[in-house]
Image: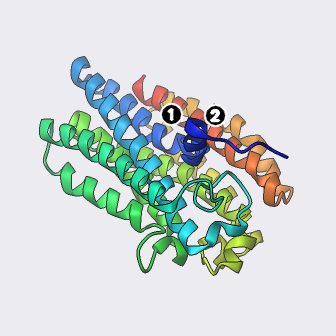
Amino acid sequence: MEKQPSGLQLWILGARPRTLPAAFVPVFVAFGIAIAQDVERPKLWWCGVFALIVSVALQVGVNYANDYSDGIKGTDNKRVGPLRLVGSGLVPAKTVKIAAFIAFGIAAVFGLFIAMATTLLLIPLGALCIAAGWLYTGGPKPYGYLGFGELFVFVFFGLVATCGSVYAITQTIDAETVFASCIVGLLACALLVVNNLRDIPGDTTSNKLTLAVRMGDAMTRKLYYAMFLYVVLLIVLIGTRDRSVLIALVGLVAAYPALKAVKSGALGRDLIPVLGATGKAQLAIGLLLAVGLAL
């Protein structure tokens, strides 16, 4: 019988480490843009580090909140994939809820430091991010159950996270920043699309109408490919003005195993490694994009 994780290991697994590239990449890209703009090094470093803490804390908070909400609704009872704290019965629902709000609280505190040092406009934006993170699967009408999860991820882990980080560090946002944030958002969406592709059978049974459930298996696989196609197009578009950005195309090599598995029709547990491979591709493309933008 497989030994169940406990203690710190349990909470680390519950935080879903495979999703953390979605938190790292926006800040890395913002860092690259700030370096290109010759931002003062002290501000670049402290603001960049604080933005990274905010981003990671928000991601972990969303993951714990999702675990709590899905767990109490029974959505995770037949889940195929990584460990769920509430759904597995290993951690009381109330404890996971507290953990989610602790993570959101950490994001709020460090976000407040950034806002006080830069612009107070970031405060309502941060509050909106936390509210959106909780309402993804929480509340009476969670929008993640209505097929709007990908839109949430694109907006908040793409546009808002990247543009917000850039603005916090540089107090400017230009067209290149917006296009780069779209790339970040699409990569984050790809992670959610493959996650929801894996969960179609269980989500259908639980009446969780994700975009994947609404579109069906075949169209969801096409959507996954479309995400990477648009990433390529946007990199090339930015590359017409800044050729160094084209280095990000090399990162697509990391996406090959995931794209191959999705095309071959992998299902259920066979899609779990694809989630990890998608995260690695997201990190590789994001890091190279950041380097290209900085040069």
- In the image, residue 117 above or below residue 174: above
Q: Residue at 19%, 52% (x, y): give it.
A: 123
Q: Secondary structure at mark 2?
A: helix
Q: Secondary structure at mark 1?
A: helix
Relative side of 37 to 215, left or right: left
- Taking depth in this image into account, of 58 and 225 the one nearest to the observer is 58
> Which residue matches tag 1?
289
Q: Position of residue 178 (x, y in %)?
A: 37, 49
Q: Position of residue 193 (x, y in %)?
A: 63, 60
Q: Residue at 33%, 57% (x, y): give it.
A: 129
Give residue 251's mark: 2
Task: Tell me whether the residue at label 1 lies in contact with that at label 2, contact meaning CB atoms closer than 8 angstroms.
Answer: yes
Query: Which image quadrant: the C terminus?
Result: top left
- In the image, residue 127 above or below residue 290: below
Q: Residue at 48%, 68% (x, y): give it.
A: 137
Q: Position of residue 236 (x, y in %)?
A: 54, 42
- Disc 1 residue type? Leu
Task: Determine the image quadrant of residue 207.
Answer: bottom right
Task: Determine the image quadrant of residue 140.
Answer: bottom left
Q: Residue at 30%, 39% (x, y): give it.
A: 166
